Amino acid sequence: MPFTLATWNINSVRLREPIVQKLLQEEGPDVLCLQECKSPVEKIPLEGFAALGYGHVVARGQKGYNGVAILSRLPIEDAGDQDFAGLGHARHVAGRLENGVVIHNFYVPAGGDVPDREKNVKFGQKLDYLTEMRDWFQSDKPEKSILVGDLNIAPREDDVWDHKKLLKVVSHTPIEVEHFAEVMDAGGWSDVTRNDVPDGRLYSWWSYRARDWDAADKGRRLDHVWATPDIKNAAHSSRILRDARGWEKPSDHAPVFATFDL
């Protein structure tokens, strides 16, 4: 049976519970992966989600920062987590569906403002995190797996509003894009979104700083859906729900969708 998956950096699941419910009600993905939940697991408002049919949850959380959760209408079991770069952050969780598909939900460090690890510890942590992701996928090759999340890198020239202006801006620097490609190659991952939407500008994030984010449209594609080679051809119908960026008290990210016939 096909299932539809969505990934969304929600920027506080407790603060934005109403728009998570709105998404679940109006779009009805079978699986919703959230990042930057900013909540201990026990304080995630699960009752409201369960009432909408999303009674299966796999999550990792911490107070005020980071946090990843998978909400599902389908039975899903906890498949563990990894603490890349030894940060002690809740940035990864995996769940396994009954059909054997493993879903990895990631929130890669943003990396601060200065793209220099000597001047900015956070940028070094981001690169180290990506390096350890690469090494993990090289040593334990994923199969029948989907990787989603806020990877905090816009890899392609048409994944940002201005390639040249953003070459020295964290999220689009050449060294980040190189690390991103190495992670992808190590796992044999395929970019599901760009397989479906190969051409043209595509964004999933617009800064809160823009007075009118929609008119300015200075976006970046920071949120991704990947699949391993054995299931990549089962993916289709990718889209980004841009309208969600304009909902009441929105996240600065929009949800990214894909459907898998598995």
Image (cartoon, rainbow, N blue to C red):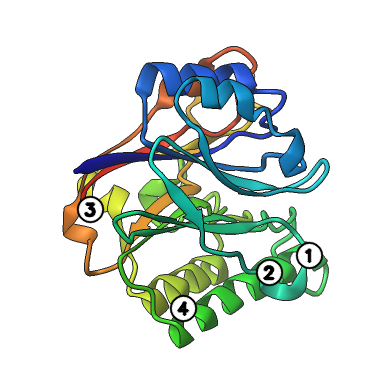
**Residue receiving disc 1:** 88
Q: x, y (%) of residue 135?
A: 53, 83
Q: Label 4 is placed on what type of residue?
A: Phe
Task: Provide the secondary structure element on which disc 3 rests.
Answer: helix
Left or right side of 155 for 40? right
Instruction: Tell me the residue at 75%/73% (across/down).
Output: 86
Task: Give the distance between the C-alpha atoms of the residues marked 1 and 3, in whole angstroms.
Answer: 34 Å
Compare marks 3 and 2 and give the one earlier in the sequence. 2
- Rendered position, 202 above or below 252: below
Q: Position of residue 87 (x, y in %)?
A: 77, 67
| Disc 1 + disc 2, Cβ < 8 Å | yes
Q: Residues within 10 Å of mark 1 (few under 14, many from 20)?
A: few
Which quarter of the figure has residue 181?
bottom left
Secondary structure under the numbered disc 4 in the rendered image: helix
Q: Quadrant of the N terminus?
A: top left
Q: Which mark is residue 83?
A: 2
Residue behind mark 3: 195
Kindly report which numbered mark, 3 or 2, lies closer to the viewer in this rendering: 2
For the residue pair 146 and 117, the one nearer the viewer reads as 146
Q: Amino acid at mark 3?
A: Asn
- Which amino acid type is marked by label 1? Gly
